[in-house]
Image (spheres, grey):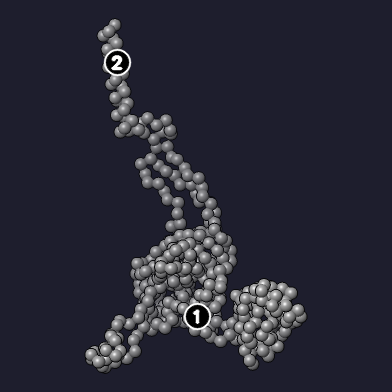
Amino acid sequence: MRKIWLIFSQAVTIGLAMLFVVATLRPDWLSRSEPVGAPATLPAMPVPGVGAVQPAVLNSGAAASNIGFSQAARRASPAVVSIVTSKLLAQKNPHAGEPWSRFFFGDRDSPPPSGMGSGVIVSAEGYLLTNNHVVEGMDGIEVALADGRRTRAEVVGTDPESDLAVLRIKLDALPVINFGNSETLQVGDLVLAIGNPFGVGQTVTSGIVSALGRNQLGINTFENFIQTDAAINPGNSGGALVDATGALMGISTAIYSRSGGNLGIGFAIPSATAKQVMDSLIRDGVVTRGWIGVEPRELTPEMAENFNLPTSQGVLITGVLQGGPASEGGLRPGDVVVRVAETRVANTAQLLAAVAALKPRSEAALQVLRGKQQMELKIRVAQRPRATAER
C-alpha cells in the first residue's frame, strides 16, 4: 500500500510540474476560447461621409488589418505639392566688403530670403491653389510634385484679403484633387491635413473639425475659417484639408501658437470660398467685390444704450468716406446697419461679407437705425479697392 501511495505522489508531482511548464511557455494550449486559426472580427466603425467601414479580420499568426484612412490619403496626396520660394536681393553694393561699409551698414552679404509652403493642384491645366502669404513678394517659385518632378510656377493672381493665390505650372499628366462641398462639413467630422511641414517632406495628419465659421481672428479681411485639431505646422500653409473620402474641404492657412508649432488649433479656408476666389482670379485676374466706403465697429449693449437705440443687433458706422458710395447714399457716422439687401448683419464680419457679395455698379438697399428712427437707404455699390496683405 505504501508503495502504491508513493507512485501516486510522484505521478501527481510530475503532472503538476508539466502543467506549470506548459502554462509558462505555451499558455495558448490551455485556452478554452475558439480554436487556433478561427478568425475574430472587429465591429464596423461608421465614418462621416463614407458610410460603414467593413470589419477587419484578425488571423492568428498574421498582422492585424488597420482601420485607417489610407485610401483617402492615396487619393489626395499626389495632388498636394511643396512650394519653395526665393527673393532676389537688390543690386549688390560695390563697397559692401570694405571695413567702413561694414561698420556703418553691417554685413549685408546674407543669402536671399526664401520660404517654403504647400499647394494643391486643382486643374489638369496646371492651376494650383496656395496661400498668398506663401508667394507674396517672391521672385522665384519652384513646385515639387509628390512623384518627384520639379518645375517653375507663375503667379496667375493673388487675393490678399482672403490670403489665397493661384499659380500655374506646365507639366503633363498632372494629378488633380476633387473639390468637396465644405458647406456640408459638421463639427466632429474627420479631416486630414496634407502638406510639407518644416520642409521634412509630404506629411499626412488627422483630426476632426473643431469649429466652423471662425472669424474676427485678425488674420484676413474676410474670415470664415474651418478650425481643426489636425496637426498644421509652418510649411503646411497652402496645403490641403480633405475629408475621409479624399475630397478637398479647405486650404490650410494659419495656426494659433505661442511657440510656432502645432497646439491643436489650426485654420483652413473653406473650399467653397477658395473655388470662388480661384475662378475669379483665373477669369479676371482679380477678385471682384462690392464696396461702400464705411468704417464699421461692433455694436455693444453699452453703445446701444448711449446712442439711445432700440436694439443691440447691428453694426455701428463710425466713419464714412467723403464722396464714397455710402456718403452719396446718405449714410452718416452713428448710423447702425441692420440689413444689407436681403441679408441681416449682426457684426462687422457679416457686414463685410454681405457688402462684398454685392455686384459693383449695382444698387443695394441698406436698412439702418438712426437713433430710434428706422430708414432704408439706396446705395450705389462700387468695386472694392485692391488691398495688400499685412501679415
**Left or right of 81 on screen, residue 108:** left
Q: At label 2, which amino acid type do we have?
A: Ser
| Residues marked 1 and 2 touching at CB (< 8 Å) | no
Residue 47 screen position, x and y as percent:
52, 54
Quadrant assignment for the N terminus: top left
Does residue 193 show up?
yes
Seen at 40% across and 42% down, the residue is 59
Gap in angstroms between the C-alphas marked 1 and 2: 90 Å
Label 2: few (<14), some (14–19) or many (≥20) C-alpha neighbours in 10 Å: few
Q: Quick check: 289 above or below 199?
A: below
Q: Kindly identify which residue carries mark 2.
A: 9
Seen at 39% across and 31% down, the residue is 31
Residue 18 screen position, x and y as percent:
29, 25
Tell me the element at label 1. Answer: loop
Tell me the element at label 2. Answer: helix
Q: Kindly identify which residue carries mark 1.
A: 160
Label 1: few (<14), some (14–19) or many (≥20) C-alpha neighbours in 10 Å: many
Q: Quick check: 54 above or below 80?
A: above
Seen at 40% across and 82% down, the residue is 138
Query: In terms of depth relative to the viewer, which is nearer, 305 or 195?
Result: 305
Q: At label 1, which amino acid type do we have?
A: Pro
Query: In terms of depth relative to the viewer, which is nearer, 87 or 369?
Result: 369
Q: Point out the tag, 1 or 2, that comes first from the N-terminus.
A: 2
Seen at 35% across and 41% down, the residue is 61
